[in-house]
Amino acid sequence: MDPDRTLERARELAPRLRERAAACEALRRIPDETMKELRESGLLRALQPRRFGGHELDPWTFYEAVMEVAKACASTGWVLGVLGVHNWQLGLFPEAAQRDVWGDDPGVAISSSYAPTGKVERVEGGFRLSGRWSFSSGCDHCDWVFLGGVAPGEGVPDMRTYLLPRRDYAIDDNWRVAGLCGTGSKDIVVEGAFVPEHRTHRFVDGFSLSSPGQSVNRGPLYRLPFGCVFGCAIAVPAIGAAEGALAHFTAATRKRVSAIPAGRPAEDAFVQARVADAASSTDGARAALHRDWQELLAYAEAGAGIPLPPRVRCRLDATQAVARGVHAVDRLFEASGGHAIFLDNPIQRIFRDVHAMRAHAINNPDKGARLFGRMQLAPDSPPTEIGDLFL
């Protein structure tokens, strides 16, 4: 599947996803028919290795597809971004782990919860995990999960992703929230599950671009930094959602007639300025990330490694993309009039969804700005926390 066909398939799905958006929210997870369509469209396999039935497209093509889906349904766009990028990360694991998951069915999906909130013990041949991990988007539709945890040891914290099959964990249906309601981001509960060494991926390997999966997946796609690839996958849904809000606002405002003050809001200079502000915010977010990915891909294709400055710039622009998306939707929501608060008005759902996206720790613009500012002002300062490896 080439980039043009990928975007075509995303746009073909959009009308049906838009029709189901309210039902998706009420269900508190992606509807079965939506997940079936995502699988059949090939979008979930965009970043998956070709040797396991994937398409190995460049990340920007995948992000464009996520934005198209998020325009129609922010929750579905979020889940596509998360599950789709997991098929890329599994390509960084040892080959044995890839075969464990995809050996019998290359269409198997993986959810995740990376925050190291559970307990990790070293045991013979691997690790034993116990505890609770929150916010595992799309978990109802997945047969495996990625869980974050710090392996016991001395020196620099050994943060890893641990891969567990569905039989080794339970899903706690506690996803009753105000935004991204349809993502089904429920808790994962583990009680003493064994994870063999080969089903782990070290954050430091993703940071240093030396993951074991690169020995079998040799394309430039797998020479990209984990933090940038994953970080953008959960940032671009905010751009798509804001673009969807802008499209809805524009169409609705053309027809609106206001009672106080009497007249047509479409002719109000202040409303017109809000539309321009929202369009500029979303366009700027898109353009900045597109520039970043052209640069990162050029480095990956050259095969000479990727220096920190463009990686830090990408993380900054990803967090700023979310902030810009929130800004755009807020401006439009404020200009939508009293009917915007009715539950049958899509803009109130988008308003709640983008604020939920902003609440994700990786989407914090202050942290993205801190990393960028430190790189500019103190480039030789050592990493101070695990999050500094998320580049």
Image (cartoon, grey):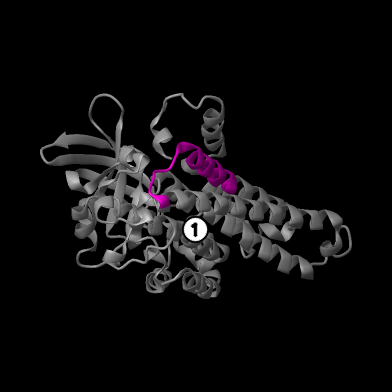
Image quarter where the C terminus lies is top left
**Which residue is at the front of the view, 293 or 302?**
302
Q: Position of residue 27 (x, y in %)?
A: 45, 63
Seen as rendered, the residue at the extreme left is 124
Looking at this view, is 22 or 391 the one in front?
391
Within the image, what quadrant is residue 156 found in? top left
The magenta region covers: 302-322
> What secondary structure characterizes most of the magenta part?
helix
Residue at 75% x, 57% y: name it: 275
Residue located at (64% from left, 60% from top): 245
**Residue 321 within the magenta-colored segment of the rendering:** yes
From the top left corner, tell me how far across and down residue 172 is, in percent.
33, 51
Q: Does the magenta stretch include residue 191?
A: no
Question: Residue sitting at 70 percent across and 53 percent down?
Answer: 280
Q: In this view, does 34 lie to the left or right of 248?
A: left
Residue 57's quadrant in the figure? Answer: bottom left
The residue pinned by badge 1 equals 60
On the rendered structure, is 286 left or right of 302?
Answer: right
Q: Can residue 345 be seen in this view?
A: yes
Foreground residue among 201 and 58: 58
At mark 1, the secondary structure is helix
> Which quadrant does the N terminus fall into?
bottom left
Crowding around mark 1 (Cα neighbors within 10 Å: few <14, some 14 to 19, many 20+) is many
Q: Nearer the viewer, residue 27 or 292?
A: 292
